[in-house]
Amino acid sequence: MAEDFEVEFIERDDRKARFLVRGMTPAVANGIRRAMIADVPTFSVDTVRFVENSSVMFDEMIGLRLGLVPLTTDLGDFEEGDVVTLALDVEGPATAYSGDIETSDGLVQPADQNVPIIELKEGQRLELEADAVLGRGKEHAKHQGGVAVGYRHLHRVEVVGDANEFDEQEPNILRGVIEEQAAEHAADEGAQNGDLVPTEAFDNDLAKRYPGKEVEVHDVPGAFVFHVETDGSFTVEELVRRAVESISDRAAELEEKIAI
Amino acid sequence: MMIPVRCFTCGNVVGEHWDEFKARAREGDEDPAEVLDDLGVERHCCRRMMVSHKDLVDVVAPYQ
């Protein structure tokens, strides 16, 4: 397996991206998906020491909420199992937000500043110290960096004929990305064969893209459209790169172990 | 009691948007669907977290 994959971005943001990969088998695509969920480590609060908690929630519930707050993770500078100490001290009346969390290491910070932890009333106080650990999604879902990670086949739409002109055309819903193969029939004037069109562009309805036509949808072999979102711990790019790295490391290890 | 930090189904962080959603759709008079679109809460699993949430801190506070 030495062929290169061809990667093309359809949508690209820090926390959300869609990209097309060609020349891949379903096994590799699924391997990458699983690695993104379970094998890329992120920081997450693991142990909490309460100094004072007179809020309406139990210590355990606040501990759970803290665990779910995403923390920025720079994977170049930390190794799995590393611990960073965080602290939170808020006195009511006020709401304790994730942004109030103080950190002992500037690289590890709450990725979102406005997540309410607990609302405190007059006279209530929350003071705690917490240890964030770099762990993997395999151990606990709070360490998952990837959110809503998945892939679909790239679709190719073939126009096979005209629809009966006296029939009311029914919606033909398709979600994903299509590779334009019948530009001459498309409702969009500027369409060219080979264009990658997300189905949202025509309201996920093929009847709107190819009005008055009978169409068939096929999968393009070996082409997968990944949809990747992160919780803010790192960028999508970092997540995908680390996931692929973890697979190739394990493959190399396997190769080395079975070689006699 | 408090808005869940993440969506139960997909794990997206929804707590981040609660304050704004509450101010605009619950206390304000904007359409909740439009506010959620605006906040980038797209999937219906995450949207139900916001739409069906009820803050209970004020209700339980006297019994502490």
Image: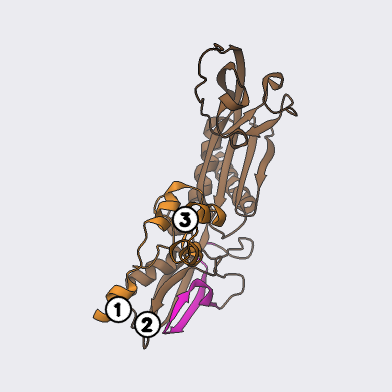
Mark 2 and mark 1: Cα distance apart in space:
8 Å
Mark 1 and mark 3: Cα distance apart in space:
28 Å
> Is disc 3 surrounded by few (<14), some (14 to 19) or many (20+) residues within 10 Å?
some
Quadrant in the rendering for residue B4: bottom left
> Is disc 1 surrounded by few (<14), some (14 to 19) or many (20+) residues within 10 Å?
some
Identified at 37% across, 72% down, the residue is A62
Circle 3 residue = B32
Per the rendered image, the range of residues in magenta is A80-103
Judged from the image, the secondary structure of the residue bearing numbered disc 3 is helix
1 vs 3, front mark: 3
Q: Amino acid at mark 1?
A: Ala
Kindly indicate which chain is depicted in orange in the rendered structure: B
Given the current orientation, which residue lies at the most extreme left position? Answer: B63
Circle 2 residue = A121
Q: Position of residue A173 (x, y in %)?
A: 51, 28
Q: Colour of chain A?
A: brown
2 vs 3, front mark: 3
Badge 2 vs badge 1, beta-carbon distance below 8 Å:
yes
